[in-house]
Every structure is written in structure tokens, then in C-alpha cells.
Image (cartoon, rainbow, N blue to C red):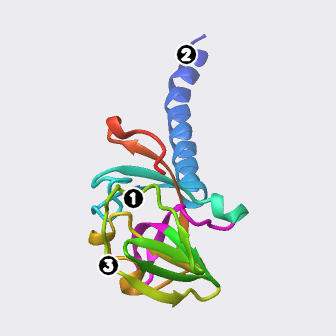
């Protein structure tokens, strides 16, 4: 009977250690291949995403489908791939972008941007052709955003994932559009 009690005492620490190892491995796999969290450091996506919002981005989403206009995307900054940016996808390769009188035009057709605050005015831009395999990104806070108007296009290989959920702060939990 003493041996069974001794086995139970040594097995509990071993079980805890095994559980910790499995949890760490799962966390690394999820972070690497499935989902990653990011903090919003600036107001470039206001009002959709606020400074210090924390979001989850799906790394799997774009393995099965292509990014679409309007998606909020996490990507590596083309001028410094160690940094992450979060912007809205505005145009895909092969499309022509122009901004006139605070209205977005893709291939000459006005595109509604319901996610922008009413009455927002911003500078004209373009007309510019987006190369194949690249994307044109803009912040929702057009007057306060470092985006494709400034540093150019985002190649497909720098896209990390699609924003899927705000998880912090508690009052802002939900899906951003």
C-alpha cells in the first residue's frame, strides 16, 4: 500500500509537468499557424479599432481564400517586415484606385465606405494601378494614417492574417467591421 501512495505522490508532479509541456506546445502551434494576437498602437484605424484594442487575427483564413476588399488585415510593414500593421484592404492587384472629394473609386466606380465616420474629409489621391500580387491598404482614420498612399503596396507574402475579434478592453469585445 505504501508503494501506491508513493506512486501517486510522484505521478502528480509528473502529470502537472506533462500538462504544462502539452499546453506550451499547443500555444506555440496555435500562435504560429492558426491565430495570433496584436495590440493596436495608433489611431490609424479609428473609429473601427481604437488605440490599445487587442485583436485576434486568423492566420488560417487566407490559406483557404483570397483577401477581399473591406477586410481588416494584419500584415508586415513593407519597409520594415519586423513591424506589423493593421489596415483595411481597399484594392487588389489589377484594380485602379483614386480618391476624389473624399470618395473612393475603384476602376472608375465609386465604392461605398460605410465603416468611415460620416462627414470625414480627406485629401485626393491617385489614380494609381495596383500591380498583380499586391494590395492597396488604407487606415479608416484617413487623415491620421500611414498607409499605401505613403509607402506603397503590400505584397501577398507579407499578409499575416485577417482580423477576426477584439478581445480587450472588455467594453469593446466583438467583431470589428
**Which residue is identified by label 1?**
116
Q: Residues within 10 Å of mark 3 (few under 14, many from 20)?
A: few
Residue 144, quarter of the rendered image: bottom left
For residue 68: magenta?
yes
Percent x, y for residue 43? 28, 61
Q: Are marks 1 and 2 in contact (CB under 8 Å)?
A: no
Tell whether 29 sits left or right of 13. Answer: right
Q: Main secondary structure of the magenta part?
A: strand
Which residue in the rendered view is the most extreme toward the right? 64
The magenta span reads 66-88
Q: Which residue is mark 3?
A: 123
Task: Give the CA distance from mark 3 to mark 1.
Answer: 14 Å
- Residue sitting at 49 percent across and 84 percent down? 153
Q: Give coordinates of residue 175: x percent, y percent.
A: 48, 44
Query: Would residue 118 appear left or right of 56 to someone viewing this image?
Result: left
Bin the neighbour count of mark 2 within 10 Å (Cα to Cα): few under 14, some 14-19, many 20 and up: few
Question: Is 26 in front, or is 55?
Answer: 55
Towards the viewer: 94 or 87: 94
Q: Residues within 10 Å of mark 1 (few under 14, many from 20)?
A: some
Front residue (pair 59, 108) = 108
Position of residue 61 relative to residue 128, above or below, is: above
The residue wearing badge 2 is 5
Q: Give the spatial CA distance, label 2 vs label 3.
A: 76 Å
Asked if the stretch drawn in magenta spans residue 7, the answer is no
Measured along the vertical axis of the image, is residue 7 above or below residue 140?
A: above
Q: Nearer the viewer, mark 2 or mark 3?
A: 3
In this rendering, the answer to whether 18 lies above or below 69 is above
Q: Earlier in the sequence, mark 1 or mark 2?
A: 2
Residue 13 percent across, percent down from the top left: 49, 31
Amino acid at each position: 500500500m505504501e508503494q501506491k501512495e508513493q506512486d501517486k505522490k510522484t505521478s502528480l508532479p509528473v502529470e502537472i509537468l506533462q500538462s504544462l509541456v502539452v499546453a506550451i506546445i499547443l500555444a506555440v502551434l496555435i500562435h504560429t499557424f492558426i491565430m495570433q494576437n496584436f495590440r493596436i498602437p495608433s489611431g490609424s484605424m479609428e473609429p473601427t479599432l481604437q488605440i490599445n484594442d487587442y485583436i485576434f487575427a486568423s492566420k488560417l483564413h487566407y490559406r483557404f481564400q483570397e483577401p477581399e476588399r473591406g477586410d481588416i488585415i494584419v500584415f508586415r510593414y513593407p519597409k520594415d517586415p519586423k513591424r506589423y500593421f493593421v489596415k483595411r484592404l481597399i484594392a487588389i492587384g489589377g484594380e485602379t484606385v483614386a480618391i476624389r472629394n473624399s470618395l473612393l473609386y475603384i476602376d472608375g466606380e465609386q465604392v461605398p465606405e460605410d465603416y468611415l465616420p460620416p462627414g470625414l474629409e480627406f485629401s485626393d489621391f491617385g489614380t494609381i494601378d495596383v500591380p498583380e500580387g499586391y494590395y492597396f491598404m488604407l487606415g479608416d482614420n484617413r487623415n491620421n494614417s500611414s498607409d499605401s498612399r505613403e509607402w506603397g503596396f503590400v505584397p501577398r507574402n507579407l499578409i499575416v492574417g485577417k482580423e477576426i475579434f477584439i478581445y480587450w478592453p472588455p467594453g469593446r469585445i466583438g467583431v470589428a467591421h
